[in-house]
Amino acid sequence: MKALALALFPALALAAAPPPTPRRVSALLIPMDQGAEARGVKLESYLLEGLEQFSGFTVRKPEELFGMPQDEEAKASLQRGTQGLTQSLKAYEANDYEDAERKLRAALKELQAAAGVMSTCTELCEATALYAAVLHRRGDVEEARLHLIDLMALSPTFELNPKRYPKEFIALRAQVATSRSAMLRGSAVVKSQPAGARVYVDGEFQGYTPMTVNTMQVGKHLLRLERPGFRQHGELIEVSPDDVEVAAELTPTPEYKKYDAQLDAVAAEIVKTAPSPAATALGKALGVDRGMLGTVKALGPQGTELVVGFFDLRSGKKLAGKRVVLQGDEFGQEKAELGRLVNALVTTALGGGTPKEKKHSDPLDNRQGTEDWNGESAGGRRGVSEKKPRGGDPLDGVNGTEDW
């Protein structure tokens, strides 16, 4: 009877079949030296973006696998600081400037300690503006100027509410904005342990540690560091015309500690052709089916070496692998290079084989990760070449990538 139903209603039977489950994939790079540690997070992000081009994958990012929690103490400070700002504002609007000043000092202290959980300076900027206004009210103009410089450093476009602040104070802010002090610039050298943390200044992404953030306006700035597998770090830094150096020790999550303990075993098996028990154990621990696993090694002036394998983490089998040497990112080319690398590895894996090559003593020799990229587009789609009429130019129709 069941067979008869399937014969009579084949379309209904097909519609009732559950859709295939998307394969959970991720990209994880293991740094082999300190120089590579600073590059790992950035290169991982490029590999992940490449994997997102494939519709059959559910990409899991390292922050999902290992966590990237906020600082709980900073969150509590933000709550207390916000409450203190509300109370200060009430005292200010009641013309009780002495009480407002006292409460603002406490609120500012809490808000400065909350730098790690603030993506914008809304509360801190409002408290800084209000404190400068209170100082101006009591006749301390120079102190008010200093806090207005901090305000403009935190947010150059912060607007003062004319219904709250008197015209004289707003005029002082405009005067400070064109002063010599407001024109001064400085730099901040930002380091972290481990390196490779994303750097945000006043909510804007700047790069990865270690790095120097240049041409910052003198005054206070919000600094936040983020690295998957570590608790977010933040602090309020004060920039001066001289270079400022910030060094942060990041706190790992329990999930990252477990992952870190497996790295040596995984790194040793990435270059092998036999199934990797370490990769299988890693996939099981992280809940990932497929993985773009690789090692990163700094080669000094010669660039950065990546040895990458695309693994079935359920069996430990390496489906495809390549070795690439990146020569730098002066023109922003690394993102495109790694996107093509991911495309080549995944399409090779899905095709069930790898191109035949001459054997060398090094199984990864001459595998630069670009051999077959010219005909591939993102997501594994093969490009179609167009026929062009021959002209007098012998290079006509040649794009320079045919032999990669």
Image (tube, helix red, strand yellow):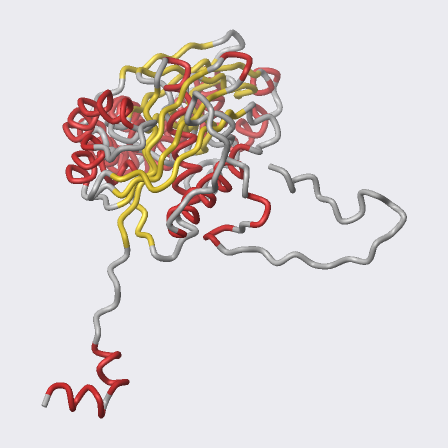
Left/right placement of residue 155 relative to residue 103 reads: right
Q: Quadrant of the N terminus?
A: bottom left
**Relative depth, front residue between 333 and 341:** 341
Residue placed at 47% from the left, 38% from the top? Answer: 160
Q: Position of residue 78 (x, y in %)?
A: 24, 32
Q: Position of residue 83 (x, y in %)?
A: 22, 36
Left/right placement of residue 192 relative to residue 186 reads: left
Left/right placement of residue 94 relative to residue 369 reads: left
Q: Residue furthest left?
A: 1
Q: Residue furthest right?
A: 392
Left/right placement of residue 50 relative to residue 124 reads: right
Say whether residue 133 is visible. Answer: no
**Residue 202 occupies quadrant:** top left
Residue placed at 30% from the left, 36% from the top? Answer: 89
**Residue 95 occupies quadrant:** top left
Q: Position of residue 172 (x, y in %)?
A: 54, 27
Q: Position of residue 84 (x, y in %)?
A: 23, 32
**Relative depth, front residue between 205 and 101:** 205
**Residue 286 occupies quadrant:** top left
Residue placed at 62% from the left, 30% from the top? Answer: 331
Q: How many marks?
A: 0
Q: Quadrant of the C terminus?
A: top right
Above or below: residue 211 compared with residue 171: above
Q: Residue furthest top?
A: 242
Say whether residue 284 is visible. Answer: yes
